[in-house]
Amino acid sequence: MKIPRYLLKSTYILIVFTVFSCNQEKNQDEKVTAVVEEPIVVYKNIHGFSEKDYEFDSSFVKSGESFGEILQRMDISYSSINKLSTTYKDVYDIRRIYPGDKYYTLRTKDSLKSAKLIYQHSPTELVVMNFVDSVSLYVVNKPITIKLKESAGVIKYSLWESFIKNNLTPALVSNVANLYAWTIDFFDIQNDDYYKIIYEAKYVDGQFIGVGKIKAMLFNHKGKDMYAFRYASPEDKVEHYYDENGESMQRALLSAPLEYVRISSKFSHRRLHPIKKIYRPHFGVDYAAPTGTEVVTTGDGKVIFAGWSPGAGYMIKIKHTFGNVVTKYLHLSKFQKGIKKGVFVEQGEKIAEVGSTGLSTGPHLDYRVYINDKPVDPLKMDIPSKDPIPDSLKEKYLKDILVLRKNLDKLEP
């Protein structure tokens, strides 16, 4: 018997035949059992629609292709297409179609050959356009399954290289950089720094679609363990990251105001000025970076100066919302639109771009910090954290993170 391709498994049906026979002594009924293989049909299923009822086909959206063109090839009338674009615009705007996305065409097996179109807008969202009996459109949101994953590694060249080598996604690298943005300068990562991480992995229909939240992490930088745990703040019930002592991972100031190539000059009370050729204090850190590199404010605050200053070129000064702290950003090429004296800016907000204005030998940012009107080294500051776990709740916090911490500690980098 030839088995069709869609038959994936079979069952056995016992068919009983009665055969009469006799021997020399007496007649006796004998039951003879024969085994006949009878197939069970298993129908293919696509997003809830069965091959039993529909004929399937699939394709990918071509560059410049519209739903109108696809539906016309399916012999859908102009009036039906127009109804989709008008009546169901609030459900899904059929102008939103993107090259490379997959779609399925379904036709009923009856004489009418009525059609459906299923457009995979994202791994979690399907747009179903129905032309069976009447015209309709609806969106199906597919459930996401979240699994906790663990990983660990030693950095030999860069955080990126180590993560990719361990089959971790670029998105996770970015999440880690954001998590430790207040405490680690990732341009100062050392060989043999290591990490341990517990994070969420998201799946749809068993297929990995991306990472979720980092649940816990240990980053060992220059021999120092830096823990981070995601935990719901008792005050606002919103999850934040805290260290092993309940201090917020967020600091009042970011560790650096830009992505730079290298540090070309450090904080010094006596440095040879590259242009004036005299020794004088340099109360900032020079970050070498290409002209146009985005500069962000390292903390919340109000702009108290944005303009030209002799020697500093285009400069911004920000008075921050904690303590008596002022930051300065020198040698800028231009300011971000809307940045002017009196404007309030939020931590991480773009305020300008790197340049080489004023007394400068090349494009870089001279970043300075003043506390109580006294200059401090930005690379050596002990920056206070934002909103730590209250002392009254710290014992509960330490108990709640204990399992995650033990799981981190047992990982081998």
Image: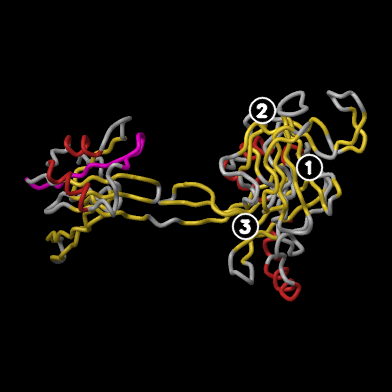
- Nearer the viewer's eye, disc 2 or disc 3? 2
Residue shown at 80%/37% (left/top)?
285
Query: Between disc 2 and disc 3, whose residue precedes?
Result: 3
Query: Between disc 2 and disc 1, whose residue precedes?
Result: 2
Residue 353 picture location, percent across and down: 64, 35
Residue on which the image places disc 2: 290
Residue on which the image places disc 1: 368
Residue shown at 53%/51% (left/top)?
201
Q: Secondary structure at mark 2?
A: loop
Furthest-left residue in view?
111
- Nearer the viewer's eye, disc 2 or disc 1? 1
How far apart marks 3 and 1 lie (CA) works out to 34 Å
- Nearer the viewer's eye, disc 3 or disc 1? 1
Image quadrant occupied by the N terminus: top left
In the foreground, 401 or 382: 382
In the foreground, 186 or 126: 186
Q: Is residue 37 visible?
A: no
Residue on which the image places disc 3: 215
Residue 322 picture location, percent across and down: 74, 59
Q: Tell me which corner region of the image, top left, top right, bottom left or bottom right, holds residue 173.
A: top right
> In the image, 228: left or right of 71?
right
- Start and end of the magenta stretch? 96-111
Q: Secondary structure at mark 3?
A: strand
**What amino acid does circle 2 point to?**
Pro
Answer whether labels 2 and 1 touch (C-beta < 8 Å).
no
